[in-house]
Structures are given as C-alpha cells and as structure tokens.
Amino acid sequence: MSRTNISSGSAFEAEIGYSRAVVVDDWVMVSGTTGYNYQTGEISDNVAEQAEQTLCNVDKALMEAGSCMADVVRVQYILPDRDDFPKTWPVLRKWFGDVKPAAMMIQSALMKEEMKIEIEVTAKKGCGLEK
C-alpha cells in the first residue's frame, strides 16, 4: 500500500498539520477546501464565486494526485447558511453535472466568518466517466 501527501501551500495546512490531499493506492481523499485563492490569499464575499474557487482548488489537488474531477465518487458540501446552497448549484452542476457523485450537504459554522462554503471530495483514480 502506497501513500502520498499533497500540499497546496495553504497556511492552514502548516498551522493545523494536515495535507490538502492524501493518495492511498488509487484513492484520493481531498481535505475540506474553501474558496481562498492560494496565490493571493484572497477570498470573495460571494458564495458562488467561493464555490468556483473551491472547486478550482480541489481540481488542482486531484490533478497533482494523478486524478481528475471525473473520478470523484463522493462529495460533501458544508455551508454556514443553508439558504446559500441553491446559489451554488449552477457552479456545482458545471463541475459535477456529468459525474454525479454521491453527495451530502451539511449546515455548520466554518473556521472563519468569510468562509461561505467548504467542499471535501473522495476520488477513485481511473473510474471517471468516458466522454
């Protein structure tokens, strides 16, 4: 069994002691990811824009792991305000409309007030739908 840790360079990873993603054999577990732009440290105040940036961050982690969004089999969405969830649906449909992973939405406070969505995914390398 092989294991590889992947880091995004986020300050949270160093401060808390976790990896953006962990690859074990053909499985990729991507940690809860938020909408910060890791190059600038900025985060939008718009939940849909945060969802888009979050999924860009997740996509980058998956690519570094040798996987892709089409390989995602499970996704969890965490939002402090459940009324914000429908505002993210067009973004979620863009990224997962063809993939259709098992999904769950949880309403919960996040680590910082500016965070409006956090997304965690699990992927199985090579299982993505062929187009």
Image (cartoon, rainbow, N blue to C red):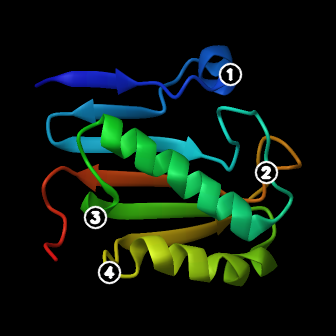
Q: Quadrant of residue 107?
A: bottom right
Q: Which mark is residue 115?
A: 2
Q: Disc 1 vs disc 4: Cβ atoms closer than 8 Å?
A: no
Q: Earlier in the sequence, mark 2 or mark 1?
A: 1
Rendered location of residue 77, percent (x, y) = 58, 63
- Residue position for label 4: 98
Q: Nearer the viewer, residue 1 or 130?
A: 130
**Hey, what amino acid is under mark 3?**
Ala
Q: Earlier in the sequence, mark 2 or mark 4?
A: 4
Q: Disc 2 vs disc 4: Cβ atoms closer than 8 Å?
A: no
Tally of numbered discs: 4
Q: Is residue 104 above or below residue 4?
A: below
Rendered location of residue 112, percent (x, y) = 84, 42
- Residue position for label 3: 70
- Tell me which residue sits at (44%, 62%) in the image: 75
Distance between mark 2 and mark 1 Cα atoms: 15 Å
Q: Nearer the viewer, residue 72 or 108?
A: 72
- Tell me which residue sits at (68%, 50%) in the image: 35
Q: Earlier in the sequence, mark 1 or mark 3?
A: 1
- Tell me which residue sits at (29%, 42%) in the image: 28
Rendered location of residue 72, percent (x, y) = 31, 60
Q: Disc 4 vs disc 3: Cβ atoms closer than 8 Å?
A: yes
**Hey, what amino acid is under mark 1?**
Ala
Q: Quadrant of residue 119?
A: bottom right
- Residue position for label 1: 11
